[in-house]
Structures are given as C-alpha cells and as structure tokens.
Amino acid sequence: MSRGIDLPETLPLFPLPGAVLMPRTRLPLQIFEPRYLQMVEDVLKTPSRLIGMIQPAEGGLDSLASVGCAGRIVAFSELDDGRLMISLRARSRFRLNEVRPGFTPYLRGQVDWSGYEGDLAAQPEEDPRFDRKGFMARLGRYMEQRGLSTDWDAAEASEAETLVNSLSMLLPFAPEEKQALLEAPALADRRELLEGLLEYALHGGDNEETIQ
C-alpha cells in the first residue's frame, strides 16, 4: 500500500542498542559519529525527514531487529564541537524487509509499514483495563528499589499511553525486553508486558545467576 512521500519505502537506519522509539513519543539523540552526522545532513534534505530507529540483534554486527520505529527530525542544534542534538517525533513502526546496499556510510533499509496504521492516529491509544493506582504502586516500588526518581505529579497527570510508552523507553530494561515492548501490538499488550517486567524485577528476576 502506497503512503506517498510521508512514509517512504526505504529509510536510513540508526541501529542503537537499548534505544527504542514508541508511538506518539519523542526521542532526543546526540549525534557525533561521522557517518550519522552525514545521515542527519542527508535526512534534512528529504521531504519526510525520517530516520528509522532500530536495535541491533544477536547474530553479528550486521544483524538488526525485525521491527523498528521511524521518527521525524523536528528539532536540531549544532554544538561548538560539531556534535548535533536532534529530537525525533515518532511517526510509525515498520518491519525491516532487507538492508539495501548503497553508497552512503550508514545503512538503509527497505521497510513495510503495514500493520501499524494505528501509530499514525492523532489521538492516543486507550487502555480501558488500565489500573493506574496499582500500576503506580508497582512502579513506585521499582523506582525505590533502584534508587531512581521521576516527576510523580507529571506521571499521575499523563495519559495512559504517554505513561506506558515513555516508561518503556526510559526504564533500564535489557535491549531484548525493550524490543518486546516495541513489538507489542497494542497499548494494553505493552502495559501488561511492562507490568510483568516490573514485577519480575521486583522479585529479583533480573539479578538471578544463571547456572552454566
């Protein structure tokens, strides 16, 4: 299905472990590697101004996750030392079909946008079964256990989707856990998975030693 220039068939890819972009969120990035400085310069010349955020996957240096999320550059500034600070606003998740060879120093991927039409909606997704009180209590225990802090007033006032998606991006989960959160089909699925990860961490699951 064609989506015009807004969602192109190929994207420049920015593989970054532990960094995921969720629907209707923003992601600040500091760019300093020459190939990605070139990527930003090239992207700013395109109509869509999209970058495909994607995590590396197990299987070698060239292996990438099957699902990423494209973000539009909505702000950027150049620092005195040549680094760039950019902000990406999520546009839509995508499936990576293949990495396309080319002459750019960064990777480009042929992508499929189908199945993620909901990411393009202006209104946030709803989760009717969201138990905010129970969720916030679990989150509070998790944050206290790890010595983390947050703006609790802002968290309480935020919509369910903003809260769940932001936490999925910001909390110190393993890359494969963040990938699972990204790939969750709907907000309710992501919230349930997030609650499970919090509960697992509270019970010491992420600190257990593996018996070889």
Image: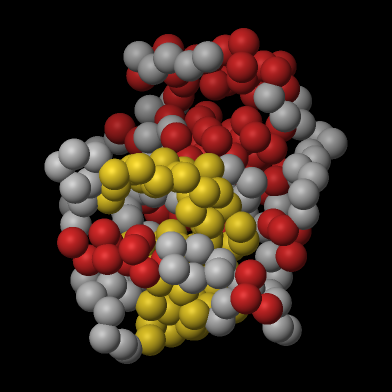
Work out whether residue 202 or residue 194 is closer to the camera in this orientation and state it: 194
Does residue 64 appear in the picture of this structure? yes
Q: Position of residue 24 (x, y in %)?
A: 64, 46
Image-based side of 95 in relation to 109, left or right: right
In the picture, measured across the screen, residue 89 lies left or right of residue 34, that is right
Q: Position of residue 184 (x, y in %)?
A: 62, 54
Q: Quadrant of residue 37?
A: bottom left
The image quarter in which residue 145 lies: top left
Residue 62 visible (yes or no): no
Is residue 98 shown above or below 161? below
Question: Which residue does the image show at 56% across and 81% down from the upper left?
Answer: 9
Q: Residue furthest left?
A: 81
Question: Quick check: 120 above or below 13?
Answer: above
Q: Residue at x 43, y 63 (%)?
A: 44
113 left or right, relative to 95: right
Count the marks: how many?
0
The single residue placed furthest to the right in the displayed view is 128
Residue at the image position 39 percent from the left and 17 percent from the top = 148
Q: Position of residue 135 (x, y in %)?
A: 65, 23
Task: Name the residue rendered at 32%, 75% in the picture.
Answer: 107
- Near-viewer residue (56 or 195): 56
The percent coordinates of residue 198 (x first, y second) are: 51, 30
Q: Quadrant of the N terminus?
A: bottom right
